[in-house]
Image (tube, rainbow, N blue to C red):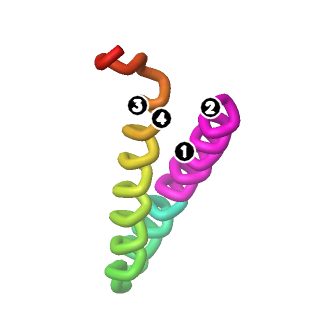
């Protein structure tokens, strides 16, 4: 279980960095008056993945209520 938690934390950190980078890219595209649709789609996917990984980590860290 510890290894899974370490991997999840690593993926969460990577996704948080990706979200920040995509947000920055979108701001730059908007400032340059360019289409930011592809960057926005990547941002939405990264945010959705981040939510899933955080939920999975919370399930691993929370003791099972059935026990």
CA neighbours of label 4 inside 10 A, class few (<14), some (14 to 19), many (20+) = some
List the residue tagged with mark 4.
Answer: 57
Expressed as whole percent of the image width and height from the top left, the position of residue 56 reads 43, 40
List the residue tagged with mark 1.
Answer: 12
Mark 1 or mark 2, earlier in chain: 2
Question: Are discs 1 and 2 less than 8 Å apart at CB?
Answer: no
Which quarter of the figure has residue 67? top left
Which quarter of the figure has residue 63? top left
Q: Secondary structure at mark 2?
A: loop
- What's drawn in magenta, residue-wise? 1-20
Numbered label attached to residue 1: 2
Question: Are discs 3 and 1 less than 8 Å apart at CB?
Answer: no
List the residue tagged with mark 3.
Answer: 59
- Gap between marks 4 and 1 measured at Cα: 9 Å
- Gap between marks 4 and 3 measured at Cα: 5 Å
Question: Are discs 4 and 1 less than 8 Å apart at CB?
Answer: yes
Expressed as whole percent of the image width and height from the top left, the position of residue 9 reads 60, 38
């Amino acid at each position: 279980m510890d290894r899974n938690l370490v991997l999840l934390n690593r993926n969460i950190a990577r996704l948080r960095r990706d979200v920040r980078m995509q947000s920055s890219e979108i701001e730059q595209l908007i400032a340059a008056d360019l289409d930011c649709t592809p960057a926005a789609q990547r941002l939405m996917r990264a945010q959705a993945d981040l939510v899933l990984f955080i939920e999975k980590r919370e399930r691993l860290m929370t003791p099972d209520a059935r026990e």
